[in-house]
Amino acid sequence: MVDRIGRDIRYLRLSVTGACNLRCRYCMPAGGDCGENQRDQLTADQIEEIVAVAIKLGLDKIRITGGEPLLREDILDIVGRVGRLAGLRELCMTTNGILLAEYAGALREAGVNRVNVSLDTLNPGRYREMTGGGTLDQALRGIDAAESAGIVPVRINVVLMGGVNDREIVEFVHLTRDRVIDVRFIELMPIGEGGGRNAAHFISGDIVLDTCPELMPINQSTEDVAQFYQLPDGMGRVGLITPISRPFCGRCNRVRVTADGKLKPCLHGGEEISLVGLSGAVLEETMRAVIFEKPKGHCLGSDRPGENRRNMYQIGG
């Protein structure tokens, strides 16, 4: 579907839960409870109908997100329903990887053909600290299981944080040398209650190129917001996602639906339109109107939050 300024909107990020089994510092406010919204989250039937309408409108890439989507007891039912919809081009999932080793094979059978694993450090102690007690080995086993199940290339999402994980850039980049893995470095965004704290750790994505000058730019799809690079002998790729230093709003092709059924045309905008209780032609026309009016851009800065007032785990990234 083409919006009012000519962008071809083809990508829906759909959160299925606000619950998570980790407490990452940039995502979860201090003392926050991420086991929330179980009663308010969309049902499997509602999710299926919303996705079916999105595909009808031309959004043929669907990403299941959270919170942590694998915490939903009916996640395989949801994935299976979405995976069987006619017109679907790509079905993806973003996960922290903790439960991925258990689910990878079943997700592949249900139709998932790509997973993004959020992983901000390769140091076990730092991982425990950054995630509020998570175990790095579980996440790494999840990545291995996804590869074994044929969900390739696995994408590892690394949120860059100055003074926290910037000394691990080389180690992450070298993961792409001998494995068909995409490592994507994402600039830290001032979102929700963690906005001020996040701003203190902001570093530009350019630090990756400064640290690894051997990386070479490569040709890529125009629909991807990441700029991709590759080591001279690398099997995988290194991506930079730079919403602060080099905004990509002009080629943004995505919208989001939150776990409680709000359609957000922009991650950083305040506009949220409830889809709960809508069906049929009313649901289709509501989604069409909101997507068509997708904002031209955001006013986000490294120390300047946008209009969004939710925390990241409540949006789905």
Image (cartoon, helix red, strand yellow):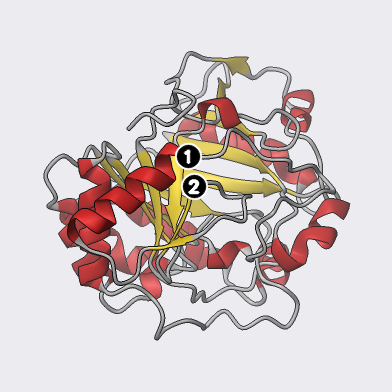
Query: Looking at the image, is 176 positioned above or below residue 12?
Result: above
Q: Earlier in the sequence, mark 1 or mark 2?
A: 2
Q: Is residue 150 visible?
A: no
Percent across and percent down for residue 247 are 67, 31
72, 171: nearer the viewer: 72
Query: Looking at the image, is 174 positioned above or below residue 232?
Result: below
In which image quadrant can residue 193 be found?
A: bottom right
Drawn side of residue 305 relative to residue 280, left or right: right
Percent across and percent down for residue 63 are 37, 50
In which image quadrant can residue 81 be found?
A: bottom left
* Picture quarter with the N terminus: top left
* Picture quarter with the C terminus: bottom right
- For mark 2, what is the residue? 265
Percent across and percent down for residue 266 are 55, 46
- Classify mark 1: helix, strand or loop: loop
Which label lies toward us, 1 or 2? 1
64, 310: nearer the viewer: 310
The tag on residue 129 is: none
Q: Are marks 1 and 2 in contact (CB under 8 Å)?
A: yes
The tag on residue 293 is: 1
Crowd around label 1: few <14 · some 14–19 · many ≥20 (10 Å): few
Drawn side of residue 112 relative to residue 81, left or right: right
In which image quadrant can residue 221 be found?
A: top left
Identify the residue at image location x=30%, y=40%: 59
- Classify mark 2: helix, strand or loop: loop
Percent across and percent down for residue 124 are 66, 64
Identify the residue at image location x=78%, y=44%: 166
Q: For the residue marked with disc 2, what is the amino acid?
A: Pro
Alpha carbon of mark 1 to alpha carbon of mark 2: how far?
A: 8 Å
Identify the residue at image location x=27%, y=64%: 47
